[in-house]
Image (cartoon, rainbow, N blue to C red):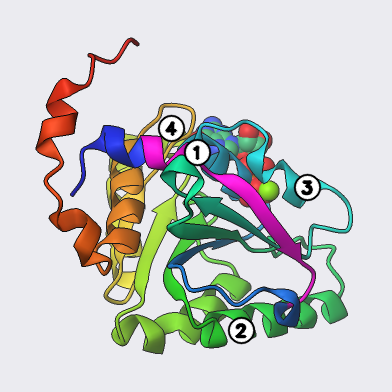
Amino acid sequence: MPDPKIAHGWLHTARFLTTAPQLEHLPSLDLPEVAFVGRSNAGKSTCINTLTQQKRLAFASKTPGRTQSINLFSLGKQGIADAVLADLPGYGYAAVPREAKLRWQRVMGNYLLTRANLTGVVLLIDPRLGLTELDEILLEVIRPRVEEGLKFLVLLTKADKLSRSEAAKALSIAKLQSGGGQAMLFSALKKQGLDEVAQLLWQWTHEANAPASKVPEAVSEADEPPALD
Ligand SMILES: Nc1nc2c(ncn2[C@@H]2O[C@H](COP(=O)(O)OP(=O)(O)O)[C@@H](O)[C@H]2O)c(=O)[nH]1
Ligand SMILES: [Mg+2]
């Protein structure tokens, strides 16, 4: 695991890369990609903005016309991208017509099954609401890929709204649902789980790229001035 400071500094470099209304418009990339998925209102934009410390980064997904698009953000120091975050369309508004639901399932299913550089998936769930029908479909779609090594995190959002015992219960259920993946509690409000998620994302996207991590980092780290909070 990297120092949380390294992981946060890396996430802070996030910048808008592109938006694609459909899968076939997504550029094929040779960088590890981590997708954020979840029903509307689960706290996805807030989570991405909190992780990257950029208030308006995931704002793009709220502008009309982009709500059903896949938005990509690149990450990497000195302007050299070493990973990509994908913000996938939110789903599950009760008012969404059946046609839109089916379209979402198609786009999402294709993305999750065919995106070659997909390294990990973060599924955001509001634990007070539990899994929706589309969450269940998504779990089914990615289960085989998780078994093949796709990284998977069920992130229980708005944890500040749960009591200790509710949180513990939700977490143990989510661990089972993750089917070999991981589960964590997260609160943007209380900054709960922030370090852990940042470290995990860094690990997912850097552990395969072994050469860089072989360079000793301790020297430059020791020279860094203390952080000013
Ligand atoms: N209490 C609390 N509210 C949150 C948290 N994260 C998001 N929210 C609220 O949940 C609502 C939906 O969040 P948003 O990020 O827009 O969800 P999205 O539709 O999944 O992108 C907003 O009113 C947020 O302020 C959190 O950690 N704690
Ligand atoms: Mg959003």
- Magenta span: 9-22
Q: Crowding near pointer 1: few (<14 within 10 Å), some, many (20+)?
A: many
On the image, numbered disc 3 is attached to which residue? 62
Q: Position of residue 41 (x, y in %)?
A: 66, 48
Residue 52, disc: 1
Q: Quadrant of ligand 1?
A: top right
Amino acid tagged 1 = Thr
**Separation of residues labelled 2 and 1 (CA atoms):** 26 Å
Which circle's residue, 2 or 4, is located before the other in the chain?
2
**Separation of residues labelled 2 and 4 (CA atoms):** 31 Å
Q: Position of residue 85 (x, y in %)?
A: 53, 57
Which circle's residue, 2 or 3, is located before the other in the chain?
3
Q: What element does badge 4 sit on?
A: helix
Q: Crowding near pointer 4: few (<14 within 10 Å), some, many (20+)?
A: some
Amino acid tagged 4 = Asp
In this view of the protein, which residue sits in the foreground, 204 or 181?
204
- Give the mark toward the camera: 2 or 4: 2
Q: What element does badge 3 sit on?
A: helix
Residue 41 showing in the rendered view:
no
Residue 109, disc: 2
Circles 1 and 4: CB atoms closer than 8 Å? no
In this view of the protein, which residue sits in the foreground, 93 or 199?
199
On the image, numbered disc 4 is attached to which residue? 160
User: Residue reaching furthest top?
Assistant: 228
